[in-house]
Amino acid sequence: MVGKYKVITLCGSTKFKDEFLREQKRLTLEGNIVISVGLFGHSGDNEVWENMDEGTLTKTKEMLDDMHKRKIDMADEIFVINVNGYIGESTKSEIAYAESTGKTVRYLES
């Protein structure tokens, strides 16, 4: 299987770490290049936020949100990890951004 690979960016709440990892593996084995989150701030990477003052925390979250939109720019489509239909505000923003740039949006759950 050598050729052109579709690039997919995963989006969703980082509280769904297990689902992110499972879908990343599945989509990769299907022959896609998968771009994921850099950290799981809502499920396990708590040390990232420890000892951060409010101003730094806000700037870091803004940076991570912007970075994820750049990841969407690099992708052909996004795949939303929406366990039990859950889509948070950041993910809604990413979906709207992807749609505004003409990207295909697919979901874990319909």
Image (spheres, helix red, strand yellow):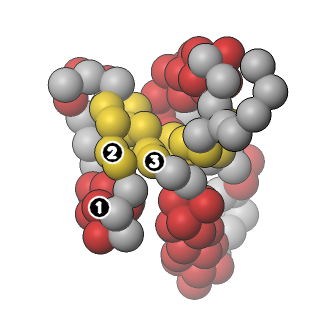
Q: Which residue is mark 1?
A: 99
Amino acid type, residue under disc 1 in the picture: Glu
Can you tell which mark lies on residue 77? Answer: 3
Q: Residues within 10 Å of mark 3 (few under 14, many from 20)?
A: many
Q: Which one is nearer the viewer's eye here, 72 or 44?
A: 72
Residue 38 shows in this picture? yes
Residue 22 rendering spot, x and y as whole percentages: 58, 16
Is residue 18 rendered to the left or right of residue 4?
left
Q: Which comes before the other along the chain, label 3 or label 1? A: 3
Could you classify mark 1 by the number of other residues whose Cα lies within 10 Å: few (under 14), some (14-19), or many (20 or more)? some
Badge 3 or badge 2: first in the primary sequence: 3
Looking at the image, the residue that sits furthest to the front is 3
Image location (x, y in percent) of residue 65: 51, 67
The residues tagged by marks 1 and 2 sit, at their Cα atoms, a distance apart of 7 Å
Residue at image point 67% right, 16% down: 29
Q: Is 29 situated left or right of 68 in this image?
A: right
The residue where tag 2 is placed is 105
Q: How many marks?
A: 3
Q: Amino acid at mark 3?
A: Glu
Label 2: how many Cα within 10 Å (few below 14, some 14–19, many 20+): some
Q: Are marks 1 and 2 in contact (CB under 8 Å)?
A: yes
Q: Amino acid at mark 2?
A: Val
Residue 85 location, x and y as percent?
21, 29
Task: Give the CA separation, mark 3 to mark 1.
Answer: 9 Å
At which x and y percent is residue 13?
42, 41
Q: Are marks 3 and 2 in contact (CB under 8 Å)?
A: yes
Image vertical order of residue 78 relative to residue 102, above or below: above
**Relative to the observer, which residue lies in front, 77 or 86?**
77
Element class at badge 3: strand
